[in-house]
Amino acid sequence: MPLVSPEIFAKQKIAALQDYSLLSWRAVTNIFSRPRYWPDIFTQMDYIGFGSLPIVVLTGFFTGCVLALQSATSLQQFGAVSMTGNLVALSMVKELGPVLTGLMLSGRNASGMASELGSMKVTEQIDAMRALGTDPIRKLVTPRLYATVFMLFFLTIIADVVGIAGGAIVSVGLLGLSPSSYLHNSYRALVYGDVVQGLAKPIFSGFIIATVGCYFGLKTKGGTQGVGRSTTQAVVVSSVFIIIVDFIVSRAMIGIFGR
């Protein structure tokens, strides 16, 4: 990678941020005008949502299992093993469910979007699309954006439910807790603010995954090596953004709901 002056580096990053912002704005506003490519949106929902379901279920289930084991080990020192359901439910719904689901989809779908659009870019398919009068952002980016946000919302709910169920299996089977006590404590631990916080994060995560993946895909250059670089950058940048936005949303929700 050639060395550049700090001034040129800053200009490049500002220009990249500007391009990313314009791409995101156009992708969001395209849904409010015609033409709308609904078949592409449903196709992306199938690929992003149902295609990611196995890995989301596995991640959520074993995260809940580990949470129950670790929580019980710590709570045992205070004689409060019965509170395991509270910790598992709060951790899954408020933090681990949304974040881990977002990171799983980032590794699977942000890389897929970047590689797919990057391949189209280096083979000049996107230029041909423009020559035929089709807007690449409306055709390629907007369906992926809305499909990712919509499906990630429901995938996060599935991850939360499966994670709490995994914690219940460990708590009842290995720790000897009562099923009714575990489920009651899990339900009692959650309040309205916790659910809102947990369901707000996948909206931001889905937006980041789709826009970052498509941005790096459309900016690909340099042949097949460029496709590989774009794929790597899309996964790294989207994962970092998801973690940063998670902190910001958590802080905002704590300020609003007080917990």
Image: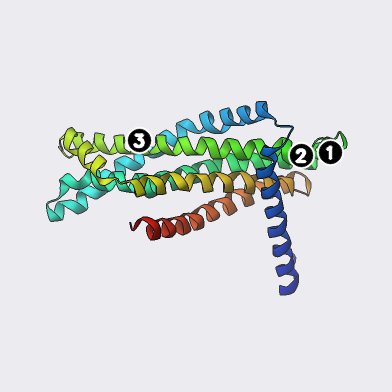
Q: Are marks 2 and 1 in contact (CB under 8 Å)?
A: yes
| Numbered circle sitting on residue 130 | 1
Q: Amino acid at mark 1?
A: Arg
Instruction: Report the Cα–Cα distance between label 3 and label 1.
Output: 44 Å
Residue drawn 50% across the image and 56% down it = 245
Q: Is residue 174 above or below residue 40?
A: below
Quarter in which the N terminus is drawn: bottom right
**Residue under pointer 2:** 136
Residue drawn 37% across the image and 39% down it = 160
| Numbered circle sitting on residue 161 | 3
Name, please, the residue furthest toward the bottom.
6
Left or right: where 157 falls relative to 36: left
Instruction: Report the Cα–Cα distance between label 2 and label 3.
Output: 37 Å
Left or right: where 229 falls relative to 256: right
Residue drawn 31% across the image and 38% down it = 164
Counting residues from the start of the chain, the first of labels 3 and 1 encountered is: 1
Q: Amino acid at mark 2?
A: Pro
Counting residues from the start of the chain, the first of labels 2 and 1 encountered is: 1
Instruction: Report the Cα–Cα distance between label 2 and label 1.
Output: 7 Å
**Residue 125's x, y, as percent?**
81, 36
